[in-house]
Amino acid sequence: MPPRVCPAPPLFLIIKGMRRYWLALTDPRLKAAMHALERAGAALGDLAAAPAGAAAFFAPLKKSLAKAAGARPGNPAGSAALAAAEDLTLRLERAFSDMARLEAPPDAAARHALLALQRACALTPRLVSRSSRAAAFAQAAALCNTGHKTLALARAAADRAPGEFPLNLKFSSIYSGLDAVFCAFERCAEALIAS
């Protein structure tokens, strides 16, 4: 008896899947959002080491996001992804600028959260791939949970710590800003998997 061969999926399903992936890669809003997440994620280590360089780093990213906002949308999820990416870059720039302005470099909790964010941002290309989007989204959600928990614990410890009130207030503000960055990443990831 010859081996059983599974029939190929109908051609229209293949074309529909390819069209969706093509739209995700050619929509200027989705491309700009993905680019912003990937670039910001890759630079987190350098920005943590030298937070004063945040304004110079984020200026071209904000410019490319603003340019993409004027482009004709090709995918319904593009606008949501773009808005979330803009929010992420603004909040991340503000967090690093606050670190520089307050002379409060990232402590262990902030570095741990930034590492989780960096790993989540590295998953961005997989969020639009039909074959790996579910697994990538689950990994990104787990990394965001880690970041949220780390920052919540650190913020609670800073709020309860006796003495050094100005320093505790600085770090509490930084932790809140980084937590908002994770929320923006989650919104962008949800839009990317819907693309």
Image (spheres, rainbow, N blue to C red):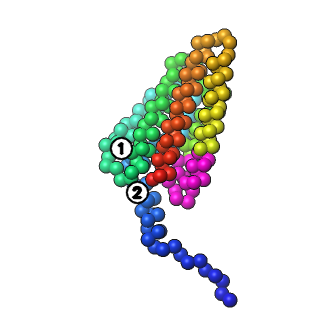
Residue ID at (48%, 49%): 192
* Secondary element type, mark 2: helix
* Secondary element type, mark 1: helix
Q: Position of residue 130 (x, y in %)?
A: 52, 59
Is 46 covered by the magenta stretch? no
Residue stretch rendered in magenta on the structure: 123-140
User: Which one is earlier in the sequence, the residue at label 2 or at label 1?
Assistant: 2
Q: Which residue was labeled with disc 1?
A: 68
Q: Amino acid at mark 1?
A: Ala
**Drawn side of residue 16 relative to residue 168, left or right:** left
Is residue 32 visible to the viewer in this orientation of the structure? Answer: no
Q: Position of residue 106 (x, y in %)?
A: 60, 25
Q: Which residue was labeled with disc 2?
A: 23
Residue ID at (46%, 63%): 17
Residue ID at (64%, 82%): 4
The image quadrant that residue 155 belongs to is top right
Q: Amino acid at mark 2?
A: Leu
Residue ID at (66%, 10%): 163
The CA distance from mark 2 to mark 1 is 15 Å
